[in-house]
Image: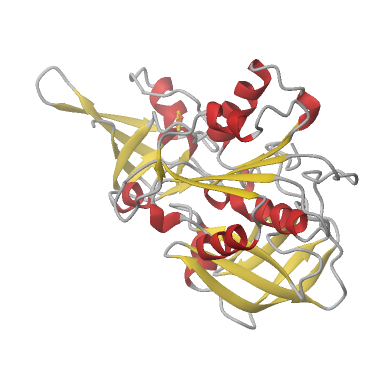
Amino acid sequence: MAVPRSPAPLKTGPLQMAHVVDVVRETPSSVTVVFATATPLPYRPGQYVLVEFRFGSGRYRRAYSLCSIPADDMAAFTVRLVPGGKVSQHITTSLAIGDRFLVSAARGDFLLPDSRAGRRFVLVAGGSGISPVMSLLRTLLAMPEPPPVSLLYYNRNADDIIFRARLEELAAAHPGLDLQLVVTGSREGWHGLHEPFAVTRVLAAARGDPQALYYICGPESLIDTAVEGLLAAGVDPALVNAERFAAPPVHERPSRGQPVTFVHRGLLLAKRTRVRGEAGESLLDMGERAGLRMRSNCRNGTCGACRATLVKGEVVMDEPNSLSLADARAGRILTCISYADSPVVVDLRR
Ligand code: FES
């Protein structure tokens, strides 16, 4: 796993200034940021950079995997809007050509082996996890004799498929590329594969090759399911590579506790329970401390079990998280990764 998941703030190391050369709209909620640096930015396909954006009165650091390949004129990363995410909101709605930000040296070990001849590759991506996987895929296909490669790319809706046209072009140009675009949510506008993520499809893509190499990047739940399923099926762990998204930016959580009112079911009518929050305490922890029956499961923003509705006030939510844009528009939050930034009213009823 290449990207650190420690709760410590993201440490960037030496940074250099970068400027935005292009912002390419990939889907309604995602963009690719093409950028240039004063001194070259060496990297290997599959690596990521730490970036620091300054806007409003804040400084925000994030880790983004590069979707470009070293042979490209410029480096690039792709960002999808995360509900409640300040940085992804800024990048997908406000970032413009010429804007500046800081960027670290490339890092990470989600890398292809040096010796690739005769190997079969199974790439699995979910959502914006396609970013480093695109870099790996293009690298493999650029080899003089590209190896057999499958790409299984999962998205909730057809509209969410990043790089769809480019992927279909690559598949048309490379008969050895087995491209499987899978939609897991709405069927609207989609006539292709439609099913939940299942490791059986990943295993089938290896076509019985016990030495196939697997590369997986996407939401934590997809990675966990894929890795556990592959290992349970007897795949050698040395053949399985997974890249998790960046650690939550805990340093941006509010530094002061706030009063929170929970609305929950009473015997007949809704009840309200007021709790004084402590600094760094999630709404889920607060509710549990007050003795409320709070729904939860993963406690890290992945499963959606703790969804509630923000009725009033402001919360800061860690990103990435599993909320859909429709959830966000409806005022849904995940209590396990939400922190009150003002007096807040939260409805726990569904
Ligand atoms: S408990 Fe799983 S998202 Fe909150």
Q: Considering the image in quadrants, where does the N terminus appear?
A: top right
Pinpoint residue 196: horizontal percent, then vertical percent. Answer: 43, 34
Does residue 122 sit above or below 10 in this rendering?
Answer: above
Location of residue 290 (image quadrant): top left
Q: Residue at x 73, y 43 (%)?
A: 3
Q: Which residue is outermost to the left?
A: 268
Of the four image quadrants, the one with ligand 1 is: top left
Q: Residue at x 61, y 28 (%)?
A: 203
Does residue 166 sit above or below 285 in this rendering?
Answer: below
Pinpoint residue 182: horizontal percent, then vertical percent. Answer: 46, 44
Task: Please tell me how many numbered marks the rendered image carries.
Answer: 0
Does residue 188 sit above or below 72 in this rendering?
Answer: above
Describe residue 333's horizontal placement relative to residue 202 as left or right: left
Pinpoint residue 35: horizontal percent, then vertical percent. Answer: 70, 74
Residue nearest the observer in this picture, 132 or 82: 132
Describe residue 15's horizontal placement relative to residue 254 as left or right: right
Location of residue 76 (image quadrant): bottom right
Q: Residue at x 76, y 48 (%)?
A: 147
Q: Which residue is drawn at 40% across and 54% down?
A: 158
